[in-house]
Amino acid sequence: MKPPTRHGPCGYTSTELLIVVAIIGLVAFMACFHFRSQVPSHMLDRAGLRLTMDLRSARMRAISENVPVQVNVDRSHCTYMIWGDRNTNGTVDLGEAEAGELEAFPSMELQVNAPCGTFLPHGSFVSSNGYWEIRLSGNGVAPRFVSVMPNGQVGWTSETL
């Protein structure tokens, strides 16, 4: 027969469990707060990247279809219109238009140095200022810039030209 052994306390005390739960709650709160503060920045990034991709697509369309592709920006509604101007009349005709809207938070502002521009069939870009710069900004967020150079190259950055 074995002599009885004395066992120490098993498990955790309620104080220890409370401390662990409090630490987990504090870390979760800080992560949630950090995530919410980053949302406007990510929304501007997404809007800038979408506009960049749509402008690159417009340039490719001008080259592949051998037609001038017009781009107009409406600052007040954060929208833009892209169309292949097959009859080169400078207006949107039936079947030519593709509209785009920038998905962003309500306080987003859109500034552009020229309201419209045209990708020519050989790939270059023409606007009243020679180049095109679109500035996306919002409350407390560093602005993002989408630019189109005269040679048709479309770029996106967080720095001004």
Image: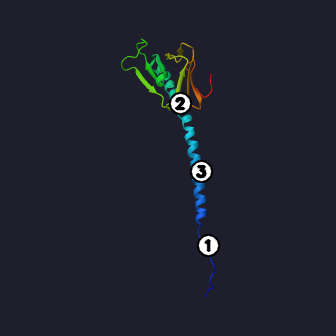
Relative height, residue 50 to residue 33 (above, below): above
Which labelled disc corresponds to residue 27? Answer: 3
**Residue occupying the point 53% across, 30% down:** 49
Q: Residues within 10 Å of mark 2 (few under 14, many from 20)?
A: some
The span from disc 3 to disc 1 (Cα, nearest Å) is 30 Å
Which one is in front, 38 or 161? 38
Asked if residue 77 is positioned above or below residue 38 in the image, the reply reads above
Badge 1 marks a residue whose secondary structure is loop
User: Of the residues shown, which amino acid type is indicated by label 1?
Assistant: Pro
Mark earlier in primary sequence (3, 1): 1
Instruction: Give the foreground label among 2 and 3.
Output: 3
Amino acid type, mark 2: Leu
Q: Residue drawn at (55%, 32%), measured in percent from left and top?
A: 45
Q: Is residue 2 above or below residue 123?
A: below
- Verify CB contact (< 8 Å) between mark 2 and mark 1: no
- Disc 2 to disc 1, C-alpha distance: 59 Å
Quarter of the image for residue 142 reads top right
Determine which of the numbered discs, if any, sits on residue 51 in the image: none
Labelled disc at residue 49: 2
Counting residues from the N terminus, which is met first, the one under dot 2 or under dot 3? 3
Mark 3 falls on what kind of element? helix
Which quadrant is home to the C terminus?
A: top right
Q: Earlier in the sequence, mark 2 or mark 1?
A: 1
Q: How many marks?
A: 3
Q: Position of residue 74 (x, y in %)?
A: 47, 21
Give percent across and percent down for residue 157: 60, 28
Residue type, label 3: Val
Q: Which residue is the site of mark 1?
A: 9
Residue at image location 45% in from the left, 22% down from the top: 81
